């Protein structure tokens, strides 16, 4: 499951966050960051899934 989450986070950050944390506040923050620019969404997704 960790490999699938990592691949999903790199390709589509909101999907990776949703797989690990569900459709809550963290997902919405990541979705907005990804819509604005891809890189902030990617950094946030990696931080939330692997550094927290």
Image (tube, rainbow, N blue to C red):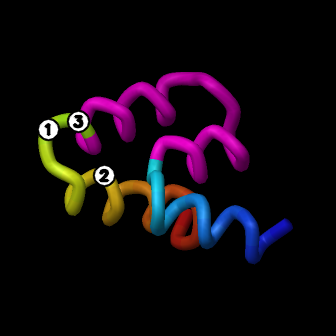
Q: Mark 3 and mark 1 in contact (Cβ < 8 Å)?
A: yes
Query: Percent position (x, y) of residue 24?
Result: 58, 23
Outermost residue on the front side: it is 11
Label 2 crowd (10 A; few <14 / some 14-19 / many >=20): many
Q: Which residue is mark 2?
A: 41
Residue drawn at (58%, 71%) of the image: 50
Task: State the separation of the CA atoms marked 2 and 1.
Answer: 8 Å
Which secondary structure lies at badge 3? Answer: helix
Horizontal arrangement in the rendering, residue 20 relative to residue 25 (left or right): right
Q: Which mark is residue 8?
A: none
Label 1 crowd (10 A; few <14 / some 14-19 / many >=20): few
Q: Mark 1 and mark 2 in contact (Cβ < 8 Å)?
A: yes
Outermost residue on the right side: it is 1
Q: Which residue is mark 3?
A: 35
Query: Percent position (x, y) of residue 42?
Result: 34, 61
- Mark 2 or 3: in front is 3
Which secondary structure lies at badge 2? Answer: helix
Label 3 crowd (10 A; few <14 / some 14-19 / many >=20): few
Task: State the separation of the CA atoms marked 1 and 3.
Answer: 4 Å
Does the segment drawn in magenta span residue 44? no
Q: Which mark is residue 36?
A: 1
Q: Mark 3 and mark 2 in contact (Cβ < 8 Å)?
A: yes
Up-down relation of residue 43 to residue 19 (above or below): below
Query: Percent position (x, y) of residue 33?
Result: 24, 41
Q: Which residues are magenta?
A: 14-34
Up-down relation of residue 15 to residue 22 (above or below): below
């Amino acid at each position: 499951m960790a490999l699938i989450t990592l691949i999903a986070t790199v390709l589509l950050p909101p999907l990776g966050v949703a797989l690990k944390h569900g459709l809550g506040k963290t997902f919405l923050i990541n979705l907005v960051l990804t819509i604005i620019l891809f890189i902030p969404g990617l950094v946030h997704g990696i931080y939330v899934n692997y550094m927290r």
